[in-house]
Image (cartoon, rainbow, N blue to C red):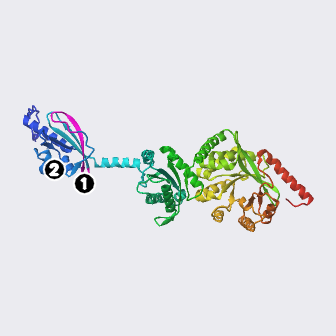
Amino acid sequence: MSARQPPFDSTPTAPAAAVAASPVDALRAENDALRLALERLPHGLSMFDGDDRLLLANRRYREIWDLPEALMRAGTPFAAIMAATRGRETAASRAALPAPGTEGTRRREWRMDDGRTIEVVVSRLADGRCVALHEDVTDQRRAQERIAYLARHDALTGLPNRMVLREELGRMFVRNARGEDLALLLLDLDQFKAVNDSFGHPTGDLLLREVAARLQACARGTDIVARLGGDEFAVLQCGSAQPTASSETARRIIAALAQPFDLGGLQVHVGTSVGIAVAPFDGDEPDALLKNADLALYRAKGDGRGTMRYFEPEMDQRAQSRRLMETELRHALAAGQFVLEYQPLVRLDEERVAGVEALLRWQHPQRGRVPPGAFIPLAEDTGLIVPIGRWVLGQACRDALRWPSTVRVAVNVSAAQFRNGLLLRDVVQALDASGLAPERLEIEITESVMLREPAQALALLRQLRERGVRVAMDDFGTGYSSLSTLHSFPFDRIKIDRSFVRDLASSDDAQSIVRAVAGLGRNLGMATTIEGVETDAQLAIARREGCSEVQGYLYSRPRPADEIASFVESVEAAQRARAAQGVPGV
């Protein structure tokens, strides 16, 4: 059978000659491409002739201006199109459109009745035609407005911020120079941190919004209420007689913020203090008035909650002294100006030194010995207590190695050291570096530490105990929930505050308190130390009521580290002598 022939002719042939496109077809193709490009533009586009009649426009142009189809025909007058738009030109439009016969570009902006903003860039060509690009910039403008608003207002409360307050202060100082009274009130909230810590930041934010609303209700219509940050607010008054107006406003604010806040069913009490500065007497420019109002607020807070104070010149002097001391305090640690002294704690049943309490001293090269009460609060306020406390731990552990192994050393730690989060590390490093046995170190805390950060404090205390470090509660009985605090953690020792000892010999109530605390300590397996014992009568009562240890000048003043070993030996020698003679202890 013969091979089948292919169904087509596979013989190569010469290519067909290209059909030349006609000029009309080429123009049509070009116009179609241009039309396609115009319709795909994300912007509206329009062109008008020299007589302001429409030559062409794309679909986006019609959508932006919401025009009927009939107005999209070529030849439609510009005036007819504008008559159909529902909006008005804004003040943002700049410069007139270049005159016919001249080239140039200008921007125009329209605010539509539906709230949208349309931006138009119009270019005049030399032959009189106009080409315009149209863009709906509503979202962009709103974002810009929001950014501008947030730059000048507090996002949480909507109040003007610190920048606006300073601008308004600058303007009002001009009015003040013309004779109008001007006052600035600064305030912050009492217990705001406790609200945040106890109930969470959302509750704290809700509280701040409620505070802002009450402040606006307390202020006059011409006052400016601002939030400066955190829980700090300001009220700026101009044009009213001072100090009468500021006094009345401050009293209204204090009374209003003293009322409970209902935060989603949760009742919260805060309160406030107010500091006031009046221009030009307390400052003739914004920064000076702000500074002095802040000094007045600092004094108001120091004088008690719910108070107001006006700036006084001596406040600035105290502030300058405080700043100088802070500078010197920062230098003191590096310069080796701190020293430790140790006050013995004597066990009553054995008449021996059971331990010592480390007491920080500042030996200033010019001031001499600075009392602890003069610099410890400042160190706590500035956070300097953290590095200072770290040094105290290390030095106390090193000193303790020079004493008999039966003597422990107690070191007070502040709430700031707890909040810092590095106390456990500092204790471990001090023990490791010195080689001191952990059971010879005792950490003393006040009840305020437990109240401010209860969960964090308990976790840290347990970690210390796991490492063998002893823990004592200092100033027992001066807090708000001493019994619940003892229930939550097994302290090794509780110290009865010296305020109960002062009238011990003459007050039945004081004796009853000491008796109750000593009994509580025995029942809970805790040693009881009574502080501030200075007389034989106080010692006799402490012994009778069952205290374990005493601390005070009756036995010893605070001593340098190199005197402790000899003092321990002298106490033990005296006890041995008394025992040999059959004489009872002191």
Marker disc for residue 150: none
| Image location (x, y in percent) of residue 275 | 53, 53
In three-dimensional space, the C-alpha distance between marks 1 and 2, rounded to whole angstroms, equals 16 Å
Give left or right: position of 133 versus 556.
left
Disc 1 target residue: 114
Give left or right: position of 219 versus 491.
left
Secondary structure state at the residue bearing disc 1: loop
Give left or right: position of 502 versus 237.
right
Residue drawn at point x = 31 percent, y = 47 percent: 141
State yes or no: residue 62 in magenta.
Answer: no
Between label 1 and label 2, give the one nearer the viewer.
Answer: 2
- Observer-nearest residue: 238 or 261? 238
Amino acid type, label 2? Ala
Marker disc for residue 83: 2
Residue 453 seen anywhere in this rendered image of the structure: no
State yes or no: residue 113 in magenta.
Answer: yes
The crowd level at tag 1 (other Cα within 10 Å; few <14, some 14-19, many 20+) is few
Picture quarter containing residue 533? Answer: bottom right
Q: Quadrant of the N terminus?
A: top left
Residue drawn at point x = 53 percent, y = 47 percent: 292
Residue 439 seen anywhere in this rendered image of the structure: yes
Residue drawn at point x = 82 percent, y = 49 percent: 567
Q: Which residues are magenta?
A: 96-116
Q: Earlier in the sequence, mark 1 or mark 2?
A: 2
